[in-house]
Image: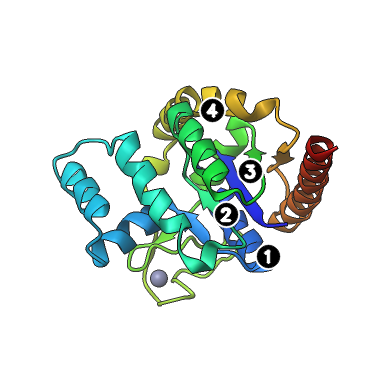
Amino acid sequence: MPLNLIMLGAPGAGKGTQAERVARQHGVPKISTGDMLRDGIRQGLPLALVAKAKMDRGELVDDDTMIGIVRERLSRPDAVNGFVLDGFPRTVAQGRALDGLMSERGSGPLMVIDIVVPEDEIVRRLAVRRICSKCGTNADPADAEPTCRTCGGTLVHRSDDDERVVRERLRVYEGQTKPLVDYYRSRPTFGTVNGAQSPDRVAEELEATIADAARAAAGASLGARG
Ligand SMILES: [Zn+2]
């Protein structure tokens, strides 16, 4: 069965890292909104250029444009056995459109996994987070090294990781994503993972949740056939 996975989680929940790991493990591409836009712009794809023009004017990219970009990306050969989406969908309208796209594809159900971390834990994590000023890599918090292990650049604390800014960012995320989580929550292929554990434990729980969702999906399609 293909792995069609959407990963949800607040900024600081460790979603990007886990999405990367799951994608590698299952041999499917990890598709993030940022990568998709950058790729599309580099290749001169019309919709990506529309999105870029909007962003350059400081506007948000509208749902229709975003969905068109996702449709193009998911139609490439490397996504034939599935994908891990990171950062899309972000709204219920995008979620509905993605459901439509999935039924066109006819390639099995979507799985949705929400990585949940309590707000205070996210604030604590980001307070100690240092990132490389040169390449943007996140430094391992347990690492006492003063410079980036990837490129040797200086590690800095970002001012938008300060508590007040982080809490505000989480509020925005909640307001935007809660309706989307509610949209998916009642499906048998929806699951949550406790993100307030070590990355290895989170990865284990994530794999177990994917296996549960796959069983639920298989059961649902058996039921549909019978
Ligand atoms: Zn670096």
CA–CA distance in space, label 2 to label 4: 17 Å
Q: Earlier in the sequence, mark 3 or mark 4?
A: 3
Q: Is residue 114 above or below residue 153?
A: above
- For the residues labelled 1 and 2, say whether their Cβ atoms are less than 8 Å apart: yes
Q: Earlier in the sequence, mark 4 or mark 1?
A: 1
Residue placed under numbered mark 4 in the picture: 180
Question: In the figure, residue 182 lies in which quadrant?
Answer: top right
Callout 1: SS: helix
**Residue 14 in picture, x, y percent from top left:** 58, 49
Q: Nearer the viewer, residue 131 or 42?
A: 42
Residue placed under numbered mark 3 in the picture: 110
Residue placed under numbered mark 2 in the picture: 84
Amino acid marked by disc 3 = Leu
Tell me if I can see residue 130 in this picture: no
Q: Nearer the viewer, residue 45 or 162?
A: 45
Taking the spot 25% from the left edge, 66% from the top edge, the residue there is 42
